[in-house]
Image (spheres, rainbow, N blue to C red):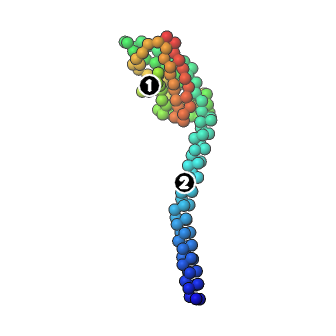
Amino acid sequence: MGFSVIAAAAMLGLTLFMAVEIITNDLLPTIDELNKSYGDMKDRYQNQLQSDINITSVTRSLNGSNYDYNITVKNTGSVTLVTKNFQILINGTIYPFTCSAEKLYPEETVFFFIMNVAGAGSQRMKVTTNNGIAEYYTTVG
């Protein structure tokens, strides 16, 4: 009877040791990665709160039967935005563009150029930044 108690205690001790080993090797790195992801999420949310843009003007010129657009966008927030990560939609369709600068600094203005857009009449535009902030503009006639 004395030996079986010692053997059971040894088995429980070994099991406890293995459980601690599993927790330290597998669970702690996962918790660390989860903590880092929460930090990244907080940084993205803070950038969204501090980002804002304003479409100050849109000019369009006739190019055959299509139109070329020059869209002026001002950064009214406090975060520097990367213009190559923007998206510009005209009537729900994404169009490729060229931009006058790679970055849009706070209180600065850039120009986006879009060529050969079909359609006459008023056009609904949406400019979206890389962190999800959007601004709308409707052209007349």
- Compared with 68, 53 (above or below) is below
Q: Where is residue 51 drawn, in percent x and y?
A: 60, 33
Location of residue 43 by image quarter: top right
Q: Where is residue 79 drawn, in percent x and y?
A: 59, 35
Query: Which numbered tag is attached to residue 33?
Result: 2
**Which of the marked residues, 1 or 2, is nearer the chain's N terminus?**
2
Q: Residues within 10 Å of mark 1 (few under 14, many from 20)?
A: few
- Compared with 99, 49 (above or below) is below
Please indicate, yes or no, whether residue 9 appears anywhere in the rendered image.
yes
Location of the N terminus (image quadrant): bottom right
Query: Which numbered mark, 1 or 2, is in the foreground of this view?
Result: 1
Q: Where is residue 69 drawn, in percent x and y?
A: 46, 18
**Residue at (48%, 26%) from the top-left corner?**
88
Query: What element does badge 2 sit on?
Result: helix
Query: What element does badge 1 sit on?
Result: strand
Please indicate, yes or no, whether residue 59 appears anywhere in the rendered image.
no
Q: How many marks?
A: 2
Q: Which residue is mark 1?
A: 93
Query: Which numbered tag is attached to residue 7?
Result: none
Type of residue at label 2?
A: Glu
